[in-house]
Image: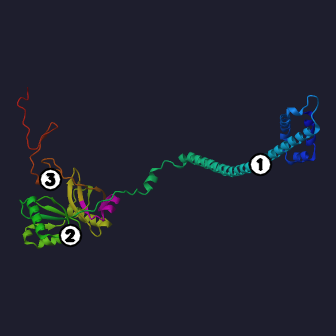
Amino acid sequence: MEATLSAFENFLQTADAKRLKGSSPMLMEFLIPIFHIFSGLVVKKLPSSSVSPSGPPTEDRSNSLTHEALDNAYQHIRDLEKQVALSEGKLQESQRCFDLVISSLASHIESTVSCVSDLKSSMEHTTDTLTSLPAIIAKPSYAQIASSPAAVSSFTIPPSEKVLLVRPLEPNAGSSTTRNKITSFLLSKNLPFRITRIKNINNGGIAICLTTDEDVNKLSQELSNNADFASFSISKPVRRKPQFILFGVDSSYNKDSITKALFLKNDIFKDGGFEVNFSIKSKSSNNWVMSVIPDLYPVIKDHGYLYLNFERVRIETFISVMQCSTCGTLGHTRNHCSNTQACVCASVVVPRTTMIEPPANLDA
């Protein structure tokens, strides 16, 4: 056994062993444990019969076994060298892949860092802007609000209806009679007019609503040429002109004198376009109501005053509210009221059709 180990040590010192030692840096790390393995292998390979009880084994048999064990060890070392070379190749390939991954991640990290820095600067700028907003957005003054353009409303005014008025000339005719006569005439003629609705108006008349002015003119011509409607008044509604009220006019003025004074002292009336309607009496003066054409309305309203000879008179838009003094209802006057006299006593409203009777036992 000692001879075998010494022979293996001598083998390691040969040129082949030196060549194996220089072939790989990692190979020599395996030689020491292999040497111990080989020692045990030699012990197992040697048969018990080879050792003579009387002395050492013969030289030939010992040499053959030693060479066989050395060949096996050399082959095992070669296999280990191949495995180490393969492992080194795999390790180098893994190292290259790892380097590629690191380089790609480094480029992504650089771009991410630049993006983060940009976002940080943007957030700082936004924070500074938000901090300065209260100073930039100051409370506007009344002059700024008044000088700003008016907001455009999205509300659209619907188109006005085209109306034809039909009134009977007889004093006691009703609107239902006029409606029935017009309806039967239109159905019998089958005229190509689009009538949207028919509604009752005062004095037994009706208002026929159509879609276009052309239809209104054609229907008016048809009714005027028909002898059955000779006892009817057929006309178009006249739009009410805007009105103004002149406050504090001297009582010495009448309708003609105030008309002449307005015409002479106001350039906007040089072409006419106005009419003095009536006066409303007050304690020391009169208030006069006048109507103007629609084109003059905004001009007069912007002025806010008119001249009467050498006086300047304040004006306002006049809106007439009709209220009956008999029944208290809005929309008509007592001249056209058919209701019963309304009586209001002690803040108690009594129905129009009844009268208040004094209580029987007032002193009780």
Q: Identify the residue at horizontal 94%, vertical 32% (top origin).
A: 56
Are dots 2 and 1 in contact, CB under 8 Å? no
Amino acid type at mark 2:
Asp
Residue 272, percent from left and from top:
27, 68
- Disc 2 target residue: 215
Q: Residue furthest bottom?
A: 225
Q: Secondary structure at mark 2?
A: helix
Q: Earlier in the sequence, mark 1 or mark 3?
A: 1
Give me the residue at 13% from left, 64% from top.
166
Using residue 323 as the reference point, say whether residue 274 is left or right of it.
Answer: right
Nearest the viewer among 345 and 66 is 66
The quarter of the picture where residue 245 lies is bottom left
Residue 363, x across and y down, in percent: 8, 27
Q: Is residue 73 above or below residue 300?
A: above
Q: Which residues are magenta?
A: 290-310
User: For this view, does 106 lie left or right of residue 56?
Assistant: left
Q: Which one is nearer the viewer's eye here, 147 or 29?
A: 29
